[in-house]
Amino acid sequence: MFNRRQFLQTTGLSSFALVFRNSYAYGTVTKNKPIVISTWAPNAKANAAAWEVLGNNGRAVDAVEKGVQVPEADPLDQSVGYGGLPDRDGKVTLDACIMDEMGNCGAVMFLEGIMHPIKVARLVMDKTPHVQLAGEGALQFALASGFKIENLLTPESEKTWKKWMKEAKYDPKQSIDILDQQSKKNLPGQINNHDTIGMIAMDSAGNISGACTTSGMAFKMRGRVGDSPIIGAGLFVDNEVGAATATGVGEEVIKICGSHTVVELMRQGMSPELACRKTVERIIKKHGTKAKDLQVGFIAVNKAGQFGGYALQKDFTYAVQTKAGSKVYNAKSIYM
């Protein structure tokens, strides 16, 4: 029988196969461009804002920066920016990062009082020699750049926090235990308790960029930072290959350098969906059956304009917009 090895040993055909494989892995044949993808169905409206840039032949990096500002300014979205649920001390702290097609990136973390942390992250990328600024330093930079301090704790989020406090009693250990119990009923990373928007886009020129912004896990310990502002964890872009972003329990994403892992698997030739699945499976390998109490989801796009997503638990959705219109997908998951 003429098997695969014999096929690859055939000089002319093996050369063709290698060229084809590299074209697939690095996406030299493009379709679906421009395209913008974001975590969670409600963020279709964020995609629409990004599309205003992409539809006018704008850069992907400008599109994602504009797009994620929609949930950042939405008081009804309790997982991002204004209206975000506070930490255990009642303070809304924000994290964000952005990465462009040239590998430039900027991030802020543990930032308070600034409505649009993604804009500050963009300035870190464009105006400083650094990648990340944190806490007071990030705030100082934002104020020096013309931003104004605003109260981001809405009455609704404050009410939710105070209700939680009645059980938590400001006891650090008890607070963690209670949050763990709540998480098993309403997993972080589910539609009613998602903790980020990740957005990735490819523009008309075929260049890819991404952004990620969050108010983090509700009632987190003071100073906690998840994966969202960490390049390689919550977001990664390689313009030769593609991009990925994550949502869910940030600690687990950080442990496996999640978004970077997805992109590297696409570099090896995997489709975006398969790369996301294989990355999710690494969490199961580390935790075994305990992974059933966690939620992590990834979305990805490759240079060819193919996209996909995968999650640990069901009900992880993502929104996609192309020239054909806007559509929401329910990602496949390990646990049903």
Image (cartoon, rainbow, N blue to C red):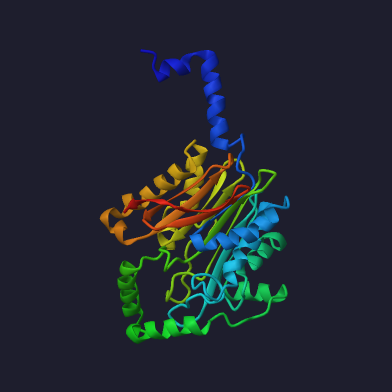
Q: Picture coordinates of residue 322 (x, y %)? A: 60, 49
| Residue 228 seen | no
For residue 336, side relative to residue 35 (left or right) = left
Q: Picture coordinates of residue 152 (x, y %)? A: 56, 80
Kindly indicate the quadrant of the structure image that contains residue 66.
bottom right
Query: Is 270 rendered above or below residue 229?
Result: above
Kindly indicate the quadrant of the structure image that contains residue 217.
bottom left
Q: Residue at x 53, y 14 (%)?
A: 11
Q: Quadrant for the C terminus, please.
A: bottom left
Query: Is 121 rendered above or below residue 163?
Result: above
* Outermost residue toward the left in this view: 289
Q: Picture coordinates of residue 265 (x, y %)? A: 47, 41
For residue 168, side relative to residue 258 (left or right) = left
Q: Picture coordinates of residue 7 (x, y %)? A: 45, 16
Q: Residue at x 63, y 44 (%)?
A: 33
Q: Residue at x 28, y 53 (%)?
A: 288
Q: Residue at x 55, y 68 (%)?
A: 95
Query: Is 335 rendered above or below residue 110?
Result: above
For residue 145, side relative to residue 235 (left or right) = right
